[in-house]
Amino acid sequence: MNNPHPPLQQIPRDILCAADYERLAPHFIATPNLAYIAGGCGDELTLAANRKAFARTQILPRLLCDVRAGHTRHELFGRSWAHPILLAPVAYQRLVHPLGELETARAAAATDTCLVSSTLASQKLEDVAPMAGAERWFQLYCQPTQAATVNLIKRAEMTGHTALVVTLDTAIKLPSRRAQEAGFVMPPDVIDANLADYPAPPPIVLEPGASRVFQGAMHQAPTWNDLAWLLGQTHLPVLVKGVLHPADATRLQAMGVAGLIVSNHGGRALDGVPASLDVLPGIRRAVGDDFPLLLDSGVRSGSDIFKALALGADAVLIGRLQVYALAVAGALGVAHLLKTLREELEVCMAQAGCATLADIGPDNIFRFNDEARSC
């Protein structure tokens, strides 16, 4: 891995907020690896848009509210959750820590946090699952063969995962320019551990004049029919990640998907799409008040979590921040990050006059552009 400094055995004194882990990350992650993790696709317009959306979304506090019985507990999928923060599926975590996802799983278990393990993890799901908490989900990329996809599903079921998260917005994905310019190359000891035992698919042979994109890279991309087939292969609830359009949201809801994750892949898929936070209210209106809706992309603080909940999310997923915390202090760092985010959310709730997550709503939000247009 050749990271500049090994993970610490204690939390650095200058970690004062969750976002500080991003500031310290360059001291613990090799420059090419950091470029791969932090970079977005294309001109990184969507990467920037995610943060700008949170910055221009402001909180409208209410006065004299009694929050002495306040808490962050809530119900999701019929189960009680201690807080609305999940660890997003992030691939190749051994890029920043020798134990990678094993350490992240330990932190999840210690903080009563749901870990969403990636298909592209650098540790096998059979090794990660026993170290995670009782609530653990498996993120699934459809494989080139149905047999491999079904095998992944069955492995997730057998290892006690309680939901599947099917990611559908990256059937084709280009390497980020930032990573290319930094000379990033995947180290030989960091592999797709979950896929290591599956045979490589045969190469696609293109006819003369065929497109490398449409007939090549997209040849085996999943379709609506593939998703319908997949839903019949498991007894687990299936969420779809990568939703940005309300019409897709309602179609997925009608198909029987258990929930949606509003996400632009942290700006790592199609560049130039809207911020996840900006499209969240429209998707919430489309699916109704009671349908499970989560959000990722751009969350860096407890106040960001508050804003996402106010605009329609039931919970949020934390992506890059967990990797930065893992690099700085391993499982201890990830656990401290989650504790810090939860406390930041509690402080924000208390100051805004919201004792519970159910108290947080659109009335707690001020967005200048929206208000200006209504004048």
Image: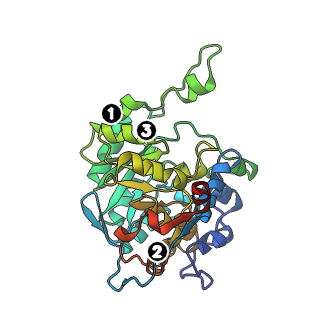
Is tag 1's residue or tag 3's residue first in the polypeptide sequence? 1
For badge 1, the amino acid type reads Ala
Residue, x 65% and y 46% (percent of image)?
A: 41
For badge 2, the amino acid type reads Leu
Q: Please say if 261 is above or below 202.
A: below
Which quadrant of the view contains residue 86?
A: bottom left
Would you say the residues marked 2 and 1 are in contact, meaning their CB atoms lie under 8 Å apart?
no
Is tag 2's residue or tag 1's residue first in the polypeptide sequence? 1
Image disc number at residue 345? 2
Residue picked out by circle 3:
248
Would you say the residues marked 1 and 3 are in contact, meaning their CB atoms lie under 8 Å apart?
no
Q: Is residue 156 visible?
A: yes
Numbered disc in front, either 2 or 1 = 2
Q: Is residue 185 visible?
A: no
Image disc number at residue 228? 1
Would you say the residues marked 2 and 3 are in contact, meaning their CB atoms lie under 8 Å apart?
no
Which quadrant of the view contains residue 5?
A: bottom right
